[in-house]
Image (spheres, rainbow, N blue to C red):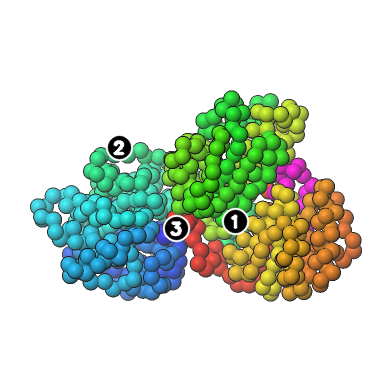
Amino acid sequence: MCGIVGYVGRQKASTILIEGLKRLEYRGYDSAGLAVLQGDGIELAKKTGRVGNLVKEAKKHRFTGTTGISHTRWATHGGVTDANAHPHVSSDGRIALVHNGVIENYLSIKKFLIGKGYTFSSETDTEVLCNLIAYHFAKATKTGDESHFLGSVRKALRHAEGTYGIAVICTEAPGELVAARKGSPLILGVGDNEFIVASDVAALISHTQNVVYLKDGEVVHITPKEFSITTLDEEDVEAVVDRVTWDIEAAELNGHAHFMEKEIFEQPAALENSMRGRFSEDGSTAKFGGLNLGPVEFRQIDRFVFLGCGTAWHACLVAEHLIERFARVPVEADYASEFRYRNGPLSGNPLFFVMSQSGETIDTLGALREAKRKGYKVLAINNTVGSTIARETDGGIYQHVGPEIGVASTKAFTSQLLIGAMLALHVARMRDMSFADGVEYVNALKGVPDLVRRVLEQAPHIKAIAQRYAHHTDFLFLGRLSLFPIALEGALKLKEISYIHAEGYPAAEMKHGPIALISEKCPSVFLVPKSEIFNKLLSSIQEVKARRGPTIVIATEGCEFPPGLADELITIPDCHEAVLPIVATIPVQLLSYYIACARGCDVDKPRNLAKSVTVE
């Protein structure tokens, strides 16, 4: 959740730290702070609220040091206060630390440390870890060994239960920084006699494209000239330096009002990138290089299980529908957070897929590990190269949509829908889908970017509708079959960024309870394809209109409605069933975005949310 940036090098650390925090603010914006080694001490500044508040606070200090750490917080332990903001400094003033994660046994450690004379000024588990490092540092014999600081961090972490990504500095180790991870992402950027550690590539890409993705249980020790990686048990680790393939321009607004707006309009290009090079030469099926499964193995699979959280779970539901519809294989889509604890019966030869844009979602990672623990093969649909999920699965499919900065997922979601549709084709062609049907399916997939462009051209029309309905405080989103998950996604988007209560339902389920909500104060958004269920959906709309409910209808071209039935009509191109969920997603994204804008909400940084959920 939280964002960490640390720097060791030749430049003024505070400038680089604040620049990095601005790029990581989507990870948490309850408070922000930085600590820099200067002279014999630690210069500290931290403030509740956005990074902009920290910038004002930092002007009161004279930061000159070249080694420092910083943090933007999504609150877990303790309220949103200056005292609870990171970095935390040990009560003896020697150690400063920033932390992403949760130390589960912090209470017992805190009790021990109080008995040793350490004091606390915050409610956080992080300050406990900071003082524990200070305790080991003070206890150790001061031999002048350069590993003394590093050893103290290691010893403290061996006692810590839970998850962490940390960066630590010490007054008696000038020019040094120690960072470690377990369950929370941490990346080392390797520059020219300078190094940056961060929770996300976005914070370091303007300085270097050479990165090392730290693994769980690894500790990196950094000086201005070199770095070394070891395990908690002091075993050496050979660093693998990767190169980031996108540049800083991909993480800039480039004239858009918000990253969410930018990423909505990037979707045609993002979808093209997700498809590129992934069709057979005869144009009849999809192919994936990273699945590590051949046709014979795929034919032996008797069930697919898809696991995800939030928006990714909605994509799992669509994949479930398409694979069952076209490949005729049973599919189960489950919340990753429930799967790992539910202990449902598993039998036969299932194949697991986990979906996560960041590749660091803690519940999805836990579900992955649970499935592998039971001996099952697990693949990933993921957008982040080098992420924990990408490394721990048996193979998978990268989305290749570039960085997604907006907290509310847009282009990553439609890419997940696209890959789910391609996967359905891949399996279907191995079973009983004909060559001709495969060619038709492939052509439909290739045409998706242009279909999405056509819907995006309606943005002014959708914006006008949004402005007319932005004052409402309750919405229903209703769809059937593959569009039911899009109804769920539309409701989620509206909740996330505009704080309007919204619910998604299968349209036919409206009569089983939700119809009680219908009134002139509760608009209903219907997703209506030109299909065999058109008349059923028409009946549902009429039931809403009979109760004076406003209706916003998103329908494929060619659908005919009785006069006055749809108060607002948004048309989308008539298209192949496999790509319909992608095309239908664009209007609900735009509707939610423009409603949030009309209400004056901070679209890219919605309250209480963070981009990557790395704590339970």
Q: In the rendered view, does 198 fall on the left or right side of 248?
A: left
Q: Is residue 192 left or right of residue 614?
A: left
Q: Are marks 1 and 3 in contact (CB under 8 Å)?
A: no
Circle 2 is placed at which residue position? 238
Would you identify the image quadrant in which residue 347 lies?
top right
Q: CA distance from mark 2 to mark 3?
A: 31 Å
Q: Nearer the viewer, mark 2 or mark 3?
A: 3
Under circle 1, the secondary element is helix
Circle 3 residues within 10 Å: few <14, some 14–19, many ≥20: few
Residue 37 drawn at (x, y percent):
24, 62
On the image, the x and y values in percent for residue 435 come to 73, 27
User: CA separation, marks 1 and 3?
Assistant: 30 Å
Q: Residue at horizontal 90%, vertical 63%?
A: 563
Task: Find the magenta span and give its range.
Answer: 570-581
Quickly name the residue at label 1: 262
Image point (69%, 57%), residue name: 487
Going from N to C along the chain, the mark reached first, 1 or 2, is 2
Circle 3 residue: 616
| Kind of residue indicated by mark 2 | Glu
Amino acid beneath label 1: Lys
Above or below residue 71? Residue 414 is above
Mark 2 is surrounded, within 10 Å at the Cα level, by few (under 14), some (14 to 19) or many (20 or more) other residues, namely few
Tell me if mark 1 has few (under 14), some (14-19) or many (20+) residues whose alpha carbon lies within 10 angstroms of its own.
Answer: many
Q: Is residue 313 visible?
A: yes
How far apart marks 1 and 2 lie (CA) works out to 39 Å
